[in-house]
Amino acid sequence: MMFRKIASLIGLLVFSSLIGAQTLTLGSKMDSEGRLLGEIFAQKLEADGFTVRRQLGLGSTSVAYQALLSGDIDLYPEYTGTLALSILNLDSTPPLDQINSHLAPLNLVALPSLGFNNTYAMALKQAQAEALGISRISDLAEHPQLRLGLSHEFVQRNDGWPGLRERYQLPHNPRGIEHGLAYEAINAGRIDITDAYATDGDLDRFNLLLLEDDLNYFPQYLALPLVHSSLPEAAKRSLAELAGRIDEPRMQALNALVSTQQASFAQAADRFLREEGLLTDATEREFSTRKWDRLGINLLQHLQLTLIALGLACVIGLPLAILVYKSRRISRSVLYIAGLLQTIPSIALLALMIPLFGIGFLPAIIALFLYSLLPIVRAAITSLLTVNPLLVQVSQGMGMTRREQLKHILLPLAAPNMLTGIKTAAIINIGTATLAAFIGAGGLGEPIVTGLALNDHTLVLYGAIPAALMAITTELVFELAERRWIPAHMRGIGRQNP
């Protein structure tokens, strides 16, 4: 009785402490500035007593916004122009109070602006602009030969390329390119013009000129915290203290600190908050600048994603194949459905998971599981159907039951091809799992995405090389497994001649 009372008291204390603790989940898009602002928000909230869980680098606007709507994150950095034109589909960018009236039914609140306008702009090399006499976006209409490489999101956005082309009557046909690679592409002469941000830290580094928006197409993009209405009032007041503290030159300088690798996101955020007197502790915090610090964690996360998804696909896919392989119509239907899932682009499938399952490990595992089904089910059905029917007839003549035929004849002979299907699914999973970083699932995609945002090829390689080595190791492991578990005399026999 005494132990029960003690246990109840402990449970009550733990529950009370959990209720009292206020843990906030903070997200950001994948771009460098979004990550930096997210880190500023996080450190400001932590300084005011909140526990913050970071989910930085969630991909495009739609991914971060859906995560906020679904409650998987509590806030992320956003811009007024994006809110009004791309998210709320308004015709113009109204004042903040009117934006909030549109956000109220969605249980969202846009807090006061940080002070700077990070508008879109069109950028090209300074030397090329001077040689061609280009200083305004209007001038582009006279140079149809210029090659445009625009970020994928900008090509599709309401406030992006479609409206810009119509306003300025531009004849160009742009190519889509990842924004983090666009400046390198301009520098290498692969493209001439790309979309840029006014406060981008790489503009001076690559000697880029921002063309004048002489027809005033782009609205204001005032940076602000976009939060869920359930965010504690104390947290809203904490973030409101950042209002008006950053102008365009200041933001560009902070971005340049990160893009030139003079400081990490955490270091740049800490420096800004201290300069503003918003961090009151006298102790200078130490931030690691080693790029490989999280490599072990990323590797373990990647293994978890791959192994769990692959295990689920085997547990469901193999029995499913055994159940349906004899029925031509049903097996074709199963393969057709699995094939349809395989045709959905991986990043699109991950994004579709967010409204259903949120962000993080669960939606990533479900998406990888769906991608694994086709190679496993197809290999299993094909291998079972191609077992030599003469052997099946002999087993029937010997009086074997269906279960005995399956156990002693069909599965042993089908095993090599089944193993090949599982191996194919494993290698597909390893590559696809790198995209899970876009929905906050971590893995080896995390350094790749961060490296793209920072134009840091070394950081990209920290994710890409281990992923490639993992795929090669997987191939070798399956080869060894086949040699060890499947006798040589069983490989390739009992098959029908094609």
Image (cartoon, rainbow, N blue to C red):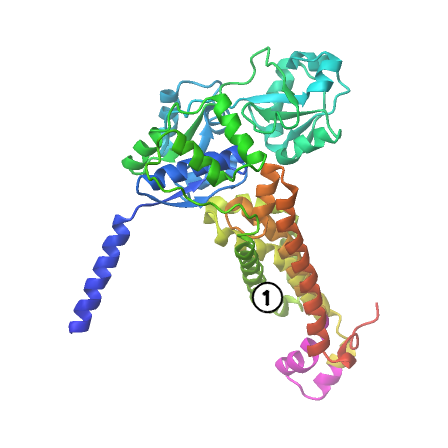
The secondary structure making up most of the magenta span is helix
Q: Can you name the residue that lies furthest to the bottom here?
A: 398
Which residue occupies the foreground of this view, 349 or 192?
192
**Number of numbered discs overlaid on the protein picture:** 1
Query: Which quadrant of the rendered structure holds the C terminus?
Result: bottom right
Residue at x 72%, y 66% (from the top left corner): 382
- Point out residue 178 in the picture as x, y percentages from the top left corner: 64, 35
The question of residue 479 being in magenta is answered with: no
The stretch of residues the image draws in magenta is 393-416
Residue type at numbered disc 1 = Cys
Name the residue tied to disc 1.
314
Residue 329 visible here = no
Q: Residues within 10 Å of mark 1 (few under 14, many from 20)?
A: many
Q: Which of these two is toward me, 225 or 404?
A: 225
Q: Where is residue 7 in the image (x, y as percent from the top left)?
A: 22, 67
| Occupied quadrant, residue 490 | bottom right
Q: Is residue 66 left or right of residue 165?
A: left
Question: Of helix, strand and loop, which one carries label 1?
Answer: helix
Camera sees residue 55 = yes
Quarter location, residue 471: bottom right
Q: Quadrant of residue 304?
A: bottom right
Taking the image as shown, residue 197 lies to the left or right of residue 173, namely left
Q: In which quarter of the image is the N terminus?
A: bottom left
Residue 454: x and y in percent read 59, 37
Compared to 429, does 382 lie above or below?
below
- Above or below, comparing residue 207 to residue 490 in the picture: above
* 399 or 32, nearer to the observer: 32
Please provide percent x and percent y for residue 139. 69, 12
Which of the two residues, 294 or 487, is positioned nearer the viewer here? Answer: 294
